[in-house]
Image (cartoon, rainbow, N blue to C red):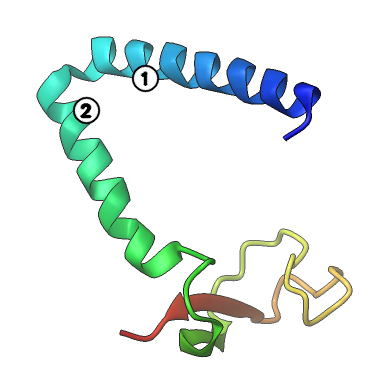
Amino acid sequence: MSPRGAEVIAVARAEEARIDEEWTKHLGGPRMRELRDSLTLLREITDLTRDPASLVITTTESARMCGDPCSCSSNDGHRQPSEPCNVQTVGYVG
């Protein structure tokens, strides 16, 4: 690792510790542990380093008619508010 990389990691770890302390003070120790446990469980379905063969991308049509420009990758972002939006969902099998 380069010296600059080591510096960046040190700054990031210090900020991580500051945030952890602030959140623990706000939530309390038991709730912070619950948060960490919950986030760890969510890694099972969100960890992009998992086997790519288990990755599933599904496209569904959303009934949402919010009036905002659609942000889907399937169009240019200028879908009419009255048209459904194709929504891609990424997840893992098993």
Q: Which residue is drawn at 34% across and 12% down?
A: 21
Badge 1 amino acid: Asp
Q: Residues within 10 Å of mark 2 (few under 14, many from 20)?
A: some
Q: Provide residue 38's location: percent of width, then percent of height.
A: 24, 48
Position of residue 67 relative to residue 56, above or below, is above
Residue type indicated by callout 2 = Met
- Mark 2 and mark 1 lie on one chain; the one further toward the N terminus is 1
Judging depth in this view, the residue of 92 and 51 nearest the camera is 51
Q: Nearer the viewer, residue 57 or 50?
A: 50
Q: Where is residue 9 in the image (x, y as percent from the top left)?
A: 62, 25
- x, y (%) of residue 69? 78, 62
Q: Mark 2 to mark 1: distance in Å?
A: 9 Å
* Element on which disc 1 rests: helix
Q: Name the residue under label 1.
A: 20
Q: Give the number of the disc on residue 32.
A: 2
Q: In which quarter of the image is residue 66?
A: bottom right
Residue at (37, 86) in percent of width and height: 93
Which quadrant would residue 88 be assigned to in this image? Answer: bottom right
Q: Is residue 53 left or right of residue 72?
A: left
Q: How many marks?
A: 2
Percent across and percent down for residue 24 are 26, 17
Q: Is residue 16 above or below residue 42?
A: above
Q: Are marks 2 and 1 in contact (CB under 8 Å)?
A: yes
Instruction: Tell me the number on the disc at residue 89.
Output: none
Left or right: where 2 falls relative to 37: right
67 over 74 or under it: above or below? above
- 71 vs 48, nearest the viewer: 48
Instruction: Give SS at disc 2.
Output: helix
Which residue does the image show at 26% across and 57% down from the upper left? 41
The quadrant the N terminus occupies is top right
Task: Judge by depth and name the residue closer to the eye, 34 or 79.
Answer: 34
